[in-house]
Image (cartoon, rainbow, N blue to C red):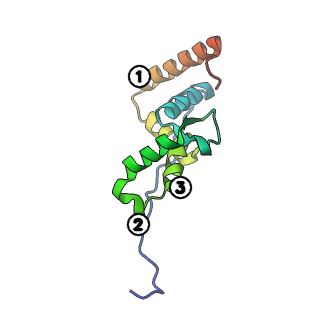
């Protein structure tokens, strides 16, 4: 292969257009995405903590242990910085991720989607009464 030839790379899949997501209001979506953040949290070692409200802080020692356990023999290819970036990621701030979540929710049977939306409504009411968190 000549150096002037472009490298062949797979094309990213073309996603369908974002469906209407007006089956839930802004509050329901905010609560749902807050739940997603709880399930897929942003994690940061103490020395690199940028957002204490949206990141779980772990000690630098815990981070180093997690890095060594997770990366192991791949440490030549996976740097500490790449691992920090991976753990610190907040998928809910990525437009494409949120759009894919919305596509997935839209595909749920109407009854399940309605129940999940009602659950998000209930959580928003409970949180506003107790002041546990803000949306």
Q: Residues within 10 Å of mark 2 (few under 14, many from 20)?
A: few
Q: Residues within 10 Å of mark 1 (few under 14, many from 20)?
A: few
Quarter of the figure with the C terminus = top right
Whole-Å distance between the Cαs marked 2 and 1?
38 Å
Q: For the residues carrying marks 3 and 2, which lies nearer the camera in this image?
A: 3
Whole-Å distance between the Cαs marked 1 and 3?
44 Å
- Residue at the limit of the structure toward the top, as seen here: 129
- Percent across and percent down for residue 110 are 42, 26
Q: Residues within 10 Å of mark 3 (few under 14, many from 20)?
A: few
Which type of secondary structure does the marked residue at label 3 adopt?
Answer: helix
- Percent across and percent down for residue 39 are 46, 32
Task: Say which residue appears at 49% left-offset and 19% top-offset.
Answer: 119
Image marks 2 and 1: residues in contact by CB distance under 8 Å: no
Which type of secondary structure does the marked residue at label 2 adopt?
Answer: loop
- In the image shown, does 41 or 7 lie closer to the viewer? 41
The numbered disc on residue 10 is 2
Please give left or right for residue 69 compared with residue 84 in the image: left
Which type of secondary structure does the marked residue at label 1 adopt?
Answer: helix
Whole-Å distance between the Cαs marked 3 and 2?
27 Å
Task: Say which residue appears at 50% left-offset and 45% top-offset.
Answer: 87
The numbered disc on residue 111 is 1
Q: In the rendered image of this protein, does residue 78 appear above or below residue 132?
A: below
Query: Nearer the N terminus, badge 1 or badge 3?
Result: 3
Please give left or right for residue 79 compared with residue 47 in the image: left
Q: Would residue 23 be visible to someone looking at this image? A: no
Residue annotated with mark 3: 81
- Percent across and percent down for residue 28 are 57, 25
Q: In the rendered image of this protein, does residue 90 appear above or below residue 71?
A: above
């Amino acid at each position: 292969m000549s150096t002037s030839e472009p490298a062949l790379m797979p094309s990213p899949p073309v996603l369908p257009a974002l469906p209407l997501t007006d089956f839930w209001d802004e509050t329901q979506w905010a609560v749902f995405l807050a739940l997603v953040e709880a399930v897929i949290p942003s994690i940061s070692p103490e020395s690199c903590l940028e957002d204490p409200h949206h990141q779980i802080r772990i000690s630098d020692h815990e981070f180093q242990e997690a890095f060594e356990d997770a990366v192991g023999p791949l440490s030549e290819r996976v740097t500490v910085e790449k691992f920090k970036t991976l753990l610190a990621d907040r998928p809910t701030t990525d437009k494409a991720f949120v759009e894919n979540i919305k596509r997935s929710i839209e595909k749920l049977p109407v009854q399940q989607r309605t129940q999940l939306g009602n659950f998000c409504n209930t959580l928003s009411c409970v949180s506003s009464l107790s002041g546990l968190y803000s949306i």
